[in-house]
Each structure stands twice: as structure tokens, then as C-alpha cells.
Image (cartoon, rainbow, N blue to C red):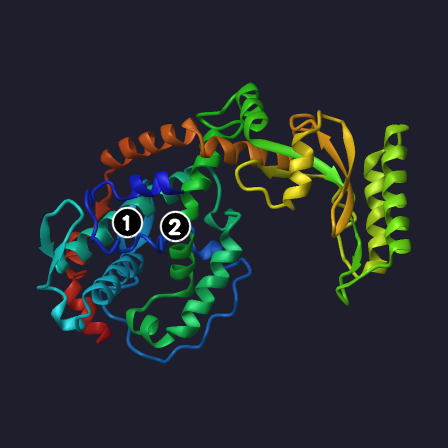
């Protein structure tokens, strides 16, 4: 996500030395076109908030793009983020922030007011661009694979800061979209570069990316100790377990379907107090960040596609089968392939395209409302 984060900060050529906003990549889109549809999805129950009057400058359509409206509340979330980072970095009171001079990475100095307001406008415009792309593809924002995660985070945030968000007139949906901001970059890339997208990547190129960066294996696993009590098995029990694994390997080499062997292995694991999903008979993993035990991935690297070998360690015994990574180009394969593309030159190209799109972005602002979204008014409302 880092390469695209650089794009998102294109107008802020230099950020605060404290990396204001860089740790939490904010996210928020409140489109009047789709917000009512989003409410029909399963969101965590919204926390009951104090009945306070909503400030006149929040919860309204601040800008429009291609008929989609974007809320001033989202703009305020970004400004509030910048404000909190400045206060934390310089250990100052809220009322002292606007006139405070802050140092940027390029050595220049600007007021914190200018920084916070520029940051908010910059991030808000990126949200508008990304959300608008998503909507133009015919998808609803709630179709994002990370939407439920964002909803959970937003609900937690709302419970912790209910009085603050009530004061600002910020809804749960505003916060959900705020949490989704970072993920919208990848979502937008997937829409553009997946099969059928405007920048569709050829099957051959995806296959090469998978071959170079991803492995696919299947493996059995039997521990040499009881994982409930953490006690080693006796030598006799260990020998029996190794013998079972050796029979697994022999059966595969004699032509038996390895998925049937893996399913049988999972049934055996019940006696060792281990639960596995018997439907999972193969896994993908990325070479640069394997999620599996190193002994298993190291063994897999020594094998040719469709070759299996017995692996014995101090803690477990396994039969590892290397699978052709491009053999079954199903949804899981496509998901891994597109993500590899995102991490490659295709992702760089996407970042460049988005920079161009941002430079030519023409949002129709409510200028009067925009003039009211000042750092001073935010501080007055909150403190």
C-alpha cells in the first residue's frame, strides 16, 4: 500500500516530520448516492449518542463528482486527524494549534492551520476520486472485501468517542467509509486490472507473476506430542505416527488422490486435540512472507511440481506435496495473482495513472460550506 500512499499525498509535497496522518491512513466517503443502500447491509448496532445539536457545517454535501455527493463530515474526520497529530507532536493545547508553526520534511515552515486544512482537503479529494471510480464500475462501496472489518473498527471508534462524534454530527457510516480509505486503493486497482477491467492483465503475465512469487503446496501434519498437554509422545507412539505418514507418501506415489489423504489426516488430528478444516487440502503462500512453518516451505522449495517428500522434525512429521501454481486458475488463484500485480510494475503504473487523474480532478465544491470548514471552527466545536 506504501507506493499508493505516496500518490495520495501528492499535494502535500512534504509532510510534518512527525508524519502526521501517515500511521493511520484515513478513509471516508459519504456519497449521498449510495449511503442509503449501505445502511441496508449488516452494520454493528450504532451506539446511542447524546442528543446534541449537529453543527451547521457538518453532515452536508461538500462536493459532487459525476453526480455523486461527498459529505463534509468526512472532510472533518481528516482535519481532526491532522489536528490530533499536531497536538501530540508539539504537545500544545488545541487553542494554540492554528498559529503554531510546523516544520515540514522539505525544511519549509507553515502554520498548523494551513497544514491541517490542506491535509484534509487533499485526503478528501482522494477519497472522492477513489469512491467515484468504484461507483462507476457498477459496484457499491459495501462490496469491498474489507467493508465488514471497517464496520467493526468504526463501531468500536464510535463507542469510544460517541460524545465527540455526536458533537460533529458524524455517523457510523461516515466512520466506516473513513476506515475503508486505504483499502479503496487496492479495490480500485482490482476493478481496473482484473479480467474485464479497462487495464486487464493478460493471463500469461499473471501466470508469470505467480510462478515468480507464489508457491502452492498441500501437506499432511501429525504432531509428535500432545498439543493439549504439551507432552511428548513415547518413542513407540512417535514411531507409529511416522509410519502413518510414510504410508501417506507411499499411497500418493501409488496414485491415490492427495486430497483424500489430507482429509484422512485431519480426522486423525482429533486424537491430538487439533482442529483443522477438512475442506482445505491445498494452500498458496508468498515466498517473501510465508505463513507456514519454515521447515515445510523449505522442503517445498526442494521439490518439483507434483513431487512429494516426507518431512520429519522434532515436533511433527509431514508429507509435503509441491503443486503447480498455475494449474487451477480459480478465484483463489486470481486473488493471489492480482495482488502480485499490485506489488509489481503494474502497481507503479496504477499509481502514475492515479496521479494524472488526481491532477485533472474537477470537484464541484459548495464553496460557502467549504469556507466554514476551518480549523478554528473544528477546535471550537470540540474543545
| In the foreground, 59 or 244 | 244
Examine the rendered structure and indicate whether residue 378 appears above or below residue 121. below
Relative to residue 171, is residue 21 depicted above or below? above
Q: Nearer the viewer, residue 200 or 317?
A: 317
Residue at image point 57% right, 21% down: 203
SS of the residue at dot 2? helix
Q: In this view, does 136 lie to the left or right of 231?
A: left
Give the CA distance from mark 2 to mark 1.
9 Å
Residue 41, given in percent of the width and then of the height, sits at 54, 57
Q: Give yes or no for contact between labels 2 and 1 (Cβ–Cβ under 8 Å).
A: yes
Question: What numbered label is drawn on residue 310?
Answer: none
- The local crowd at label 2, few if under 14, some if 14 to 19, many if 20 or more residues have their Cα within 10 Å, is many
**Residue sitting at x 31%, y 57%:** 74
Secondary structure of residue under mark 1? helix
Instruction: Say which of 280 and 68 sits in front.
Output: 280
Residue 167: horizontal and vertical position, in percent? 29, 74
The extreme front residue here reads 235
- Residue 89 on image: x %, y %: 22, 63
Residue highlighted by disc 2: 181
Residue beneath the point at 30% across and 43% down: 8
Q: In this view, does 81 lie to the left or right of 180?
A: left
* Mark 2 or mark 1: whose residue is earlier in sequence: 1
Q: On the rendered image, what quadrant is the C terminus found in?
A: bottom left
Q: Is residue 99 left or right of residue 166?
A: left
Measured as percent of width and height from the top left, residue 63 is found at 26, 49
Q: Which mark is residue 123?
A: 1
Rendering quarter of residue 131: top left
- Decide which of 212, 375 is in the foreground and name it: 212
Amino acid at each position: 500500500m506504501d507506493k499508493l500512499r505516496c500518490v495520495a499525498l501528492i499535494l502535500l509535497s512534504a509532510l510534518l516530520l512527525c508524519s502526521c496522518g501517515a500511521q493511520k491512513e484515513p478513509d471516508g466517503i459519504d456519497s449521498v448516492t449510495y449511503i442509503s443502500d449501505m445502511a441496508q447491509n449488516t452494520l454493528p448496532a450504532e451506539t446511542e449518542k447524546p442528543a446534541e445539536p449537529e453543527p451547521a457545517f457538518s453532515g452536508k454535501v461538500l462536493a459532487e463528482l459525476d453526480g455523486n455527493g461527498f459529505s463534509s463530515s468526512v472532510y472533518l474526520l481528516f482535519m481532526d486527524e491532522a489536528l490530533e497529530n499536531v497536538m501530540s507532536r508539539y504537545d500544545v493545547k488545541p487553542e494554540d494549534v492554528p498559529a503554531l508553526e510546523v516544520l515540514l520534511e522539505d525544511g519549509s515552515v507553515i502554520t498548523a492551520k494551513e497544514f491541517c486544512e490542506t491535509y484534509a482537503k487533499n485526503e478528501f479529494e482522494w477519497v472522492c476520486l477513489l469512491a467515484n471510480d468504484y461507483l462507476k464500475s457498477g459496484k457499491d462501496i459495501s462490496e469491498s472485501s474489507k467493508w465488514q472489518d471497517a464496520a467493526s473498527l468504526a463501531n468500536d471508534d464510535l463507542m469510544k468517542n460517541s460524545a465527540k462524534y455526536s458533537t460533529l454530527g458524524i455517523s457510523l457510516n461516515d466512520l466506516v467509509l473513513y476506515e475503508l480509505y486505504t483499502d479503496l486503493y487496492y479495490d480500485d486497482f482490482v476493478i481496473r486490472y482484473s479480467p474485464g477491467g479497462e487495464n486487464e492483465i493478460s493471463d500469461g503475465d499473471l501466470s508469470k507473476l505467480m510462478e515468480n512469487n507464489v508457491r502452492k503446496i498441500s501437506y499432511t501434519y501429525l504432531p509428535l506430542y500432545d498439543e493439549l498437554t504439551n507432552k511428548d509422545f513415547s518413542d513407540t507412539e512417535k514411531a507409529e505416527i511416522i509410519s502413518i505418514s510414510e504410508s501417506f507418501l507411499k499411497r500418493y506415489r501409488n496414485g491415490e488422490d492427495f486430497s483424500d489423504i489430507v482429509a484422512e489426516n485431519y480426522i486423525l488430528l482429533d486424537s491430538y486435540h487439533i482442529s483443522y478444516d477438512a475442506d482445505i487440502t491445498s494452500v498458496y503462500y508468498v515466498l517473501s512472507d510465508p505463513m507456514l512453518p519454515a521447515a515445510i516451505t523449505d522442503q517445498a522449495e526442494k521439490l518439483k511440481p507434483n513431487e512429494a517428500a516426507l518431512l520429519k522434525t522434532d515436533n511433527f512429521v509431514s508429507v509435503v506435496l509441491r503443486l503447480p501454481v498455475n494449474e487451477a486458475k480459480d478465484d483463489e488463484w486470481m486473488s493471489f495473482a492480482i495482488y502480485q500485480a499490485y506489488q509489481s510494475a503494474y502497481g507503479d503504473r496504477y499509481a502514475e495513472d492515479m496521479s494524472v487523474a488526481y491532477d485533472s480532478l474537477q470537484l464541484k465544491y459548495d464553496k460557502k460550506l467549504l469556507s466554514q470548514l476551518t480549523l478554528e471552527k473544528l477546535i471550537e466545536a470540540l474543545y
